[in-house]
Amino acid sequence: MNSSFKLDTHPRRPRPLMSEPPAGYFDQLPGRVMARLPQTQARETATAWRWLAQLSPTLRTGLASVAILGSFAASFWLSGSPPLAPAPMPTAVLDAVPHAELVGYLLSSGTQVENADLAVLTAARPSIANGFLHASAEELTEVLDAQPSDETMYL
Amino acid sequence: MEDHEILRKFQDPASRNLAFNQLVRKYQSKVYWHVRKMVIDHADADDLTQDVFVKVWKHLENFRQDAALFTWIYRIATNECLGFLSSKRRKFLLPLTDVGADLAAKIEADPALAGDEIELKLQRAILRLPDKQRLVFNLRYYDEMPYEQMAEITGTSVGALKASYHHAVKKVEEYVTRSMGD
């Protein structure tokens, strides 16, 4: 005859007889858990957008519509061609070139430059052609006087 | 570190990770064994223990402290275990007894039980209990947890827990007695 089993008489253990987890398991577990946690940045982002979830569906739909219309308006505004800058006048470009360089270019380009060509320039700035224009002030004045008046008025 | 200290530090983003690390170190063994007793297999227990702490991390900010921290963690662990066993049953379309048999096969293969016939029969008997009743049995018999705390964890009344444990003990004793005659 079998005696009946009584739990009270069986030696009580804090847990069933089971093999222990691998050595060092509980030393590594915290690190493995920490590695699985969502990133703090993602958590903060989620928190930052939590207010959106708390809005009513109607309000959320309205907000979405406004956002879409706003993005359309912004893209339309930004896609327009930028205002055209006024084209610089040709003389303005020439004005930016130093006179000495202009004179040097004229002298080296093979073109015969005569006193008449540079008379106006030296009249405005007497020292500019000192290095290469061998003409006295009187000679230049004569050349200028000899030019037709309709040409000089445009210089 | 005391629970209130862990919770206080967890609220501060600068010390949150450190506080949570302390929490895991403090409760990992209890959670692991609570889970292991339910799922038997170490690999499953390992996965579930990690899942439990990840859930604790996600919800600790909203922990209202109307229960002890440990009770709250135990509740999460309990739900994870029951969910795991339930999904396992659904996944393989297994009836309750087959899941018990699967767990029994695992525990029989455990070298720690080799040669201890009575203990083996006891474990087989426990694994034949329905999941929730087995949970009650584990909490009371192995952890010697007060019924009031068990009630907080399981969301069941003290009276119902006492009745459940009483029936569980009877079933276990009957099974072991019967199997001793085999």
Image (spheres, rainbow, N blue to C red):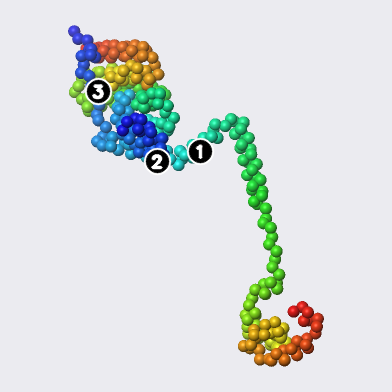
Q: What is the number of the mark on residue A48? A: 1
Residue drawn at x 22%, y 27% is B112
Q: Which residue is drawn at 32% across and 24% down?
A: B38
Point out the image quarter for the N terminus of chain B: top left
Q: Which of A129 and B138 is in front in this view?
A: A129
- Residue A26: mark: none
Answer yes or no: is residue A95 visible. Answer: yes
- Up/down of B94 relative to A66, above or below: above
Q: Spatial distance from mark 3 to mark 1, Cα to Cα? A: 46 Å
Q: Residue sitting at 45 percent across and 38 percent down?
A: A43
Task: Say which element carries label 3.
Answer: loop
Host chain of mark 2: B
Looking at the image, residue B139 lies above or below residue B26: above
Where residue A58 sits, quadrant-wise, is top right
Circle 1: element type? helix
Q: Nearer the viewer, residue B95 or B44?
A: B44
Numbered circle sitting on residue A14: 3
Amino acid found under the numbered disc labelled 1: Ala
Using residue A66 as the reference point, say whether residue B94 is left or right of it: left
To which residue does mark 2 refer?
Answer: B14
Residue neighbourhood size for the residue with mark 3, other residues' Cα within 10 Å, grouped as few (<14), some (14–19), many (≥20): few
Rendered-image quadrant of the C terminus of chain B: top left
**Residue type highlighted by circle 2:** Ala
